[in-house]
Amino acid sequence: MENNNPEPKVYSAGYAGTFHGSSDFSTEYSCFYEKEPDGTVGASNLYVLASGVKGTSFPEVSARFTAKKILYEYFHSYDYVDANKLALAMRTANNEIYEYAKVQSDSMESAAIAASVTNGKVAIATVGGCRAYIIRNGKVFQITEDAAPVEEQEQSGKEADNSNAIPTSLGKERDITTDVYDGIDVHGGDTLLLCSGSLDTFIGKKEILEAAENNSPRSIVQQLLGSSSLDKANVPASVAAIRIYEGDQVDTMIRVDGDSPEDTDLNLEKKEIEMIRANRPKKQKSENGGKKKKDKLPQIILSVLLGLMLLAAGVWAAARFGIIPEEFRAKYLGDLVPPRDTPTPTVDWVRESMTVYEITAEAQKAFAVAATVAAWPTQTPYPTFTPVFIDLEETQTMIRETTAAEIQNQVAIAVESTAAAVLEAGNTETSSQEAENADAAVTATPYPTLAPEAVTPAADEVKENYTDERSGAEMIYIPAGNFMLGSNLNEDPYADEAEEAPQLRVYLDGYWIGKTEVTNAQYLRCAEAGVCDQGYYMSLYQPGLENYPVSYVTVEQAERFCSWIGGHLPTEYQWEKAARGTDGRIYPWGNEEPDYDNAYANIPNYVDDEGYGNDLFEVGSFPNGESPYGLLDMAGNVWEWTSTWYSANYYQTLQAEGELSGTTVSNPTGPENGSSRVMRGGSCASTEVNNYPAYTRTAGRSYLSQSSSYFVGFRCVVPDNGGTIPPYVDENQGQPGDPFQGPRP
């Protein structure tokens, strides 16, 4: 039946503005861009505010960059979900601020809030002390929540977890967790407000309701920024007003398109601000706030005095050097100016000659002394010692691993070697110096050097690789043993000390892991078996994408698939060992960074010889980048989920556990809970073009603030439970009424 009353199309029109305040340059910035209704149908309108954090370096630069970057990245995102685009845009701005400040040895931070309006729905993302309100039917509702800082949690008696505390500003940490509010329905007549933290301090609901009576978003913004309480405070503040209206009101709305999204960087913003400051005329304010002319009287008096002084000096000089006649000088100037003819001083030429001789003699003496000093041999009066820093944990580990019998055996070998060397030299008697050397060789404890564990295990430890019959996924065996977890801060230029240190020796049991990321075709098998859920944005049925990594998959969906083939998502420790082997390499293939020539990984903006690129590739397209165990795409293409909850400083916890037990850390599983799962491996997303050398490292750690993304996939791990390969379970042999086939997790 035809719908005679279709739901009216909903649009938005907005305006954003900033109050300068008393600062030399505003530490806040606002911008927006609208594509509806005049642009692409169904496109989004985006509104952004950013506030530089006081006490950090260049807060005005951080604010301008953050707002412009979010605007640009949102409209250039490959993602389809508004909430994801907002979160990824904020993450990109955060990472660029963090890396820039790290290089400059500064701290740069900013708070931000952004709202996109698409087809009558609003998505909001925020980091820091910004708020969003909706005014509906004469009432004001706050949409966003105010996250209490850790300090307030402690004061209120709550136990604060600093390790998982959400950063309150962009640029504070290498990655960021964004508060996202998605799927908010709006209707004609609603008004949305985005407010910076300083505006909330001085503007209440009364002022908001009074301003919202205006039909024009520009008028709403101007009234709020011109509030008397804000004007008295004289602090910078920003606000964006967004009016929601229906299609029949398009012609009645006064629209301002805003700023066209253009890419930017921190250096560019910094130079632009410096240029504006240099060209800005200085303002002189009177008591009533207007301009008034300076009092000219002091300047006139100073000018007259200066002129009289110059005139007097000129007359004196003219009389002194004979320009003025002598009779005039004597009559009018008298003793003020002496007569021109003065007696010539008598020169004692003998004294002058002696002075020249003495100066020359002193110079020759100084030259001789300097030449003598330069000829002295260079000697260091005291020996210089280079401090040696001892890794106590490694020393203790070596002591534990070296038995008493081994030490005695090595001491005996050292004694025999020393004696043989003495006899071979033909010395029948050992000098005192040689005796001391021999004693030192005997008494020193010769701890063995721990060589990296070989990648290829012993013959009796080799397990068979196999192909899972349910999904078709190739599974590669990773033998039991130790490996080095984390980054060596002295060798890895991109190492993050806060998240990837200390580097630890970790033992893992054997397991199988997927050779490649799970593909669309493999995931489709699970979906057709009635086990896996099909996400709305997945490309399971699109021809030509069968061997591409499945994306837009949540952690829960990934775990379901892995359980179906008898396994689970890898822990981040299992993932890292499979990626780097046991020699501590920085990337799966070695220590060389990936670039557009070596074709080690699908990195942002990569294009192959046939001109294809700037997007995902089929799994296994980069064989040059295989790991020591033969795994592919462990760097780039898509990020990969792990089962481990994210905690920035968890490696320090592992180190403490190892020291307490006195043994090597064994089969860690990570924190018991958290807010986000760890992702590994980096991706080809254009938002990571400045950071991919760090993200694609085997030790690189990250996390995601939303449930899924176009650039996030996964691979599975099957544990080695007694060395048997998990058997194929026929789909018709499951429990009655249970569509799930295969072992339970």
Image (cartoon, rainbow, N blue to C red):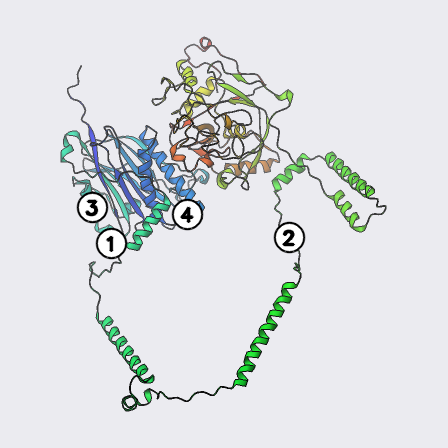
Q: Which mark is residue 107?
A: 4
Q: Earlier along the polypeptide chain: callout 1 or callout 2?
A: 1
Give the amino acid type for the residue marked by disc 4 in the picture.
Ser
| Numbered disc 3: secondary structure | helix
Q: Secondary structure at mark 1?
A: helix
Q: Residue under label 1, please give it.
A: 232
Marks 1, 4: nearer the viewer? 4
Give the residue type that dot 3 points to: Gln
Is residue 362 toward the left or the right of residue 117 in the image? right
Q: Residues within 10 Å of mark 4 (few under 14, many from 20)?
A: some
Foreground residue among 397 and 537: 537
Q: Earlier in the sequence, mark 1 or mark 4?
A: 4
- Select label 1 or label 2 by which is in front: 2
Residue 433 is left or right of residue 159, and the answer is right
Q: Position of residue 390 (x, y in %)?
A: 62, 44
Q: Is residue 561 above or below residue 416?
A: above
Which residue is found at the position 36% from the left and 17% from the top? 543
- The kind of secondary structure element at disc 4 is loop
Give the residue at mark 3: 222
Q: Which circle marks residue 385 in the picture?
A: 2
Work out whether 365 lies above or below 399.
below
Q: CA distance from mark 2 to mark 4?
A: 36 Å
Q: CA distance from mark 3 to mark 4?
A: 33 Å
The tag earlier along the polypeptide, 3 or 1, is 3
